[in-house]
Image: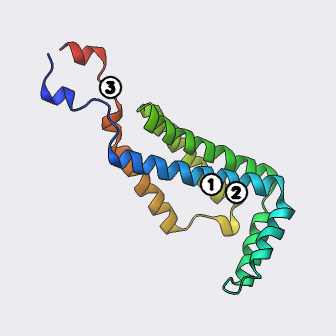
Amino acid sequence: MNTPDSTTNRAKRGLLLWILSICTMIQAGNNILLYALFLLFPDKMGQAVGNLTQVPFFDEEAFKEIIQIFQSIAGWQYGLLILVEVAIFAGALIMLWKLKPIGFHIYMIGQIGLFCVLNFVIGGNLMMTWDAIIWTVFIILLFASQLKYMSEPDENTKNQ
């Protein structure tokens, strides 16, 4: 028996899920590219960003400090960062494309991994600040609010 309550719980892509997933995939893709470039070409990236310091409105000291931070990260640490960003990207993609809750779980594993890598493995100036942690938790809660739209009713509840 189909009741109005059982049909409203079917999977659907809401506007919030679209916005969250697209923005997350863009950010994760951008981070993957950045980390891969610094992993593969650390000296070239330092030179490229160093050339930006010639533009009048850039703060040369701030750029030098940022480049030193990124060049101080070991290659295997960039590999870990790339892995967690891939998990974040894949989780958002699965949530949006397949509307499966497993995407949220993959996304969460990626976010927990990112937290651990930034705070415990790399540390230093790349540690997450409290506002970054709060913002990440807020985004996770927004994704979690969309879980009710992702789950298809199982066969037992459809037949009742």
The quadrant holding residue 68 is: bottom right
Name the outermost residue toward the bottom: 56
The kind of secondary structure element at disc 2 is helix
Check residue 30 in the rendering and tell me which mark sits there, or answer none: 1
Q: Position of residue 85 (x, y in %)?
A: 61, 47
Amino acid under label 3? Answer: Glu
Q: Position of residue 95 (x, y in %)?
A: 44, 37
Image height of 115 relative to 92, above or below: below
State the residue in front, 75 or 35. 35
- Mark 3 or mark 2, whichever is nearer to me: 2
Residue at the spot of label 2: 34
Q: Earlier in the sequence, mark 3 or mark 2?
A: 2
Report the quarter where the N terminus lies: top left
State the residue in front, 103 or 60. 60
Q: Could you tell me which residue is drawn at 56 percent across and 54 percent down?
A: 27
Badge 2: how crowded within 10 Å, few (<14), some, or many (20+)?
A: some
State the residue in front, 159 or 119. 159
Amino acid under label 1? Answer: Asn
CA distance for labels 1 and 3: 32 Å
Q: Earlier in the sequence, mark 1 or mark 3?
A: 1
Q: Could you tell me which residue is drawn at 40 percent across and 57 percent down?
A: 138
Asked if the residues shown at circle 1 and circle 2 are in contact, with their CB atoms under 8 angstroms apart, the answer is yes
Q: Is residue 33 shown left or right of residue 141?
A: right
Check residue 152 in the rendering and tell me which mark sits there, or answer none: 3
Q: Could you tell me which residue is drawn at 48 percent across and 53 percent down?
A: 23
